Every structure is written in C-alpha cells, then in structure tokens.
Amino acid sequence: IPTPGSYLEGDDSPIVRFQQYLRINTAHPNPNYIPAVSFLKTQALSISLQTRVLEFTPKKPVLLLTWSGSNPSLPSVLFNSHMDSVPAEPEKWLHPPFSAFKSPDGKIYARGAQDDKCIAIQYLEAIRNLKARNFRPTRTIHISYVPDEEVGGFDGAAKFVGSKEFKELNVGFVLDEGQASITDMYRVFYADRSPWELIIKAKGDPGHGSKMYDNSAMENLMKSVEAVREFRESQFDKVKAGIALNSEVISVNPVYVKAGIPSSSGFMMNMQPSEAEAGFDCRLPPTTDPDLLKKRIAEQWAPSIRNITYQIIEKGPIKDHNGRPLMTRTDESNPWWSAFTQAIAAVGGKLGRPEILSSTTDSRFIRQLGIPALGFSPMTNTPILLHDHNEFLQDKVFLKGIEVYESIMISLSSFLKDLDESTPLNG
Ligand SMILES: CSCC[C@H](NC=O)C(=O)O
Ligand SMILES: [Zn+2]
Ligand SMILES: [Zn+2]
C-alpha cells in the first residue's frame, strides 16, 4: 500500500488521488489534520489555486482554496468539506479502513469514502478539468476544508463562518455534504435537524436490594425513560405509517444509562443507588417549536416532583438571526436553487424531492447567517454507509460525481441574475 503523498508512475488519476487522501487517517478521537492539509494544499497548488491556512484553534486548521472569478465583486460560491471522519473498527471490515483498497469490481473501501472525502477530491478534480478546458468562472469559487464536523464543528466551521476572513469572502451560496442515494436519483438537503443532548438525572432513597419501596432513584429514572419511550413511539409511528419521513419528526434515542454502586466484580447487586442518570440524543426538525419540547421535557419527561433534574445542551441553532427556521428555499425564488437544478439536469441527472437531513452538518452555521446552503454528495445507486462498517464508493460513481461538480461550478459561478438582497433565501 503506497503511503499518502507517494507518487508512483501511473498514479496520475482522480481515483488514485482519492485513494491517497483516504489513506490519511483523520478519524476521531485523535484526528491529525496536518498531513490532510498538506496533501490537499499540494493538490490545489498543482492546479494553480490560491491557498490559505486559517487556524482558529491550535491543531485544527481550515484550508481555504480560491479560484478567482472574472467579476470578483459578485457574491462568491463556497464548496465545503470536512477533513475528519468517525472512527472505524478494523476487525469488522472486509479490508483495512485506511487502505482504500479497490476491489476488482471497482469499489473503494475506506472510512470517509462517502463521508465525506469523496467530495473533497471531486471539487478539486472538477476544477482541474474546467481549467484544462480554459473555463473561467465569473463569480469567485472557494473551497473550504474544515476540521471537527463529526464532533459538532464548534472548533471548525462554526469559528470559520464567524470570522472576518469568512465575511471578506462575500459568500452568496454554499454547497456542503449530503448523503448517498440508493436509487438513480440524486438527493439534496435544504435543512438539517438540530441536535440537542438531553441528560436526565434522578435522585431517590437508597436501600437494601431486597426491599420494595417507593421513590428510589432507579424507579424515578425508569418513569422518565418510559415517558420518553412513549413520545419516541408516537414519532416513530408516524414514520412507520408513512405520514412523515424519518427526518421530519423529532427523534429521541437513549444513548447511555449510568447508575449503580461499583463492586470488585461489577456492581453491588444488593444496593439500590441514590442517583441514576440517562442520556438522550434528540434531533429537532427546523419547524419544531423548541419551547413546546422544553415544556414537555419539564412536565412529562423530567418533572422535579419526581426528584428529577435535567440538562439540555443545544448543539446548534434552529432559527436564524431573524427567527426564521434554518431552511434553504428550494423554489424559483432562490436563483441559486434554479442554477443548481439546471446543472444537475445538464449532465442527465435526476434529482429527488428536496429533503431535510436526519443528522446534522456544518451547513447549519451557514444558514444561521442567512446564507443559503444545500447538502449534496453526488452518489446514486449507492448503499448509505456513512459511519458504518465497510464504507465504500464505486469508482464509476466517484468519477461521475466529478462531472456533476463541473456542471454545478459552471452554472453557479456564471449565472448573472441579479440577487435581490431583500429577498430571503432561507426560511
Ligand atoms: C452535535 S452536532 C454533531 C454532528 C454530527 N454530524 C455527523 O454525523 C451528527 O451527529 O449529526
Ligand atoms: Zn460528514
Ligand atoms: Zn459523518
């Protein structure tokens, strides 16, 4: 297996460059961004892009690439990709997750193959091809490579979009990652669900394990868990009945429970603990009324009358600075949307109905500024394997994606319809 950066005879192909990038291990919990930035920077310089490394947090660089347009006073277009990936359990994979092994039928296996190192390289390859054809954009095109998306983006995209450097880019529209599609239609996302972490803590009376009594911490916690479970079922039932998509309901999933008095071999089984807690991952669609959910938590899931306390950690906004939900418009009122859909059609692509993303990406920080952003990763006929074992991408799908981005870059960087500043493109 060649190491990243080793450049053998015959290695000059988009697939090989994709594999080289995939071999750079940027998985949590200790992503090393330095080799990733250096690899991407080398690629960018080879196609004469301007490069800048911004460091808002030590060891968490943002790499910014720029292809100047012929009319740099127009709002620019930004293509974003995160450099980190989630961890992998190598023993559960068919091929080592950082080998970028290509099977005889052209599947490239690696952590990050879909999420989202594919788009990182596709952006560059699209520019390489456009430059080879002497295309010159009218609007300026930027690419950003950001750290830490998988852990919330707070030291990455959040700081970047809040910076004066970002402001100076005069970004009019952003494309960020999306998700694979199992059909022949591309998927596009106009909103993310907003993440809340909910921690419910119960207190209660301690006692001998043999004794039945009211108001133990575990009993109090179990009542909370049951209340959450009922709500979860009400939401999931809508999905099962086909009334709503997964990403259109509020999800609440238990992710840990913590209780018990430790013993030498595990837990003291004859002691009922005086404290117990549980953690939940909640995701709120952009139209959710957060106050209603807070009321439900306070009154039904975690009432103080049952000796329960709770903490909500909001990991992202759900409204923009004007109080509008963080949704990018997908109709003709948004000229970027029209330019995007035309670009897909121009390469023979079919687009599915725009969706809300079930999970959460850096796009929320962009939309919070009132800047329109779409989530899009050009992968059709591909199983959805983000965060899964044996994540892979088919070579032909990857190559088609480059062509798609060429079309998108042409279209987005060159449409000249006036953008009326007073028309909101989100909300
Ligand atoms: C707290 S924001 C976390 C962002 C993360 N993104 C990808 O999986 C997610 O869990 O959706
Ligand atoms: Zn991602
Ligand atoms: Zn991810």
Image: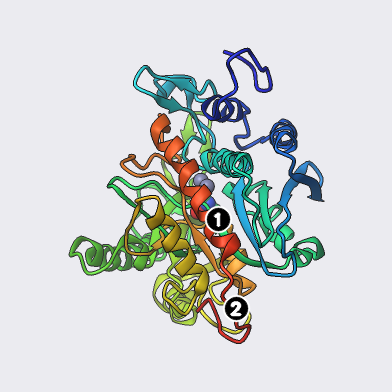
Q: Position of residue 167 (x, y in %)?
A: 76, 67
Q: Write down the residue under mark 2.
A: 419
- Please give the count of numbered marks on the rendered protein: 2
Q: Is residue 356 left or right of residue 274?
A: left
Q: Residues within 10 Å of mark 2 (few under 14, many from 20)?
A: some
Q: Write down the residue under mark 1.
A: 410
117 to 194, vertically: above or below: above
Q: Residues within 10 Å of mark 1 (few under 14, many from 20)?
A: many
Label 1 and label 2: CA atoms lie apart by: 18 Å
Q: Amino acid at mark 2?
A: Leu
- The residue drawn where x is 63% and y is 41% is 83
Please tell me whether mark 2 sits on a helix, a strand or a loop: loop
Q: Is residue 126 left or right of residue 288?
A: right
Circles 1 and 2, Cβ within 8 Å, touching? The answer is no
Q: Amino acid at mark 1?
A: Ile
Please tell me whether mark 1 sits on a helix, a strand or a loop: helix
Q: Is residue 363 left or right of residue 351?
A: right
Q: Nearer the viewer, residue 135 or 421?
A: 135
Q: Is residue 168 left or right of residue 385?
A: right
Q: Position of residue 190 (x, y in %)?
A: 45, 66
- Which quadrant of the structure image shows residue 32? top right
53 to 244, vertically: above or below: above
Rendered-image quadrant of the N terminus: top right
- Of the two numbered discs 1 and 2 on the same chain, state the one appearing first in sequence: 1
Q: Position of residue 101 (x, y in %)?
A: 47, 20
Front of the two marks 1 and 2: 1
Q: Position of residue 231 (x, y in %)?
A: 32, 68
Q: Nearer the viewer, residue 121 or 150?
A: 121
The answer to whether the residue bearing label 1 lies less than 8 angstroms from the nearest atom of ligand 2 is: no
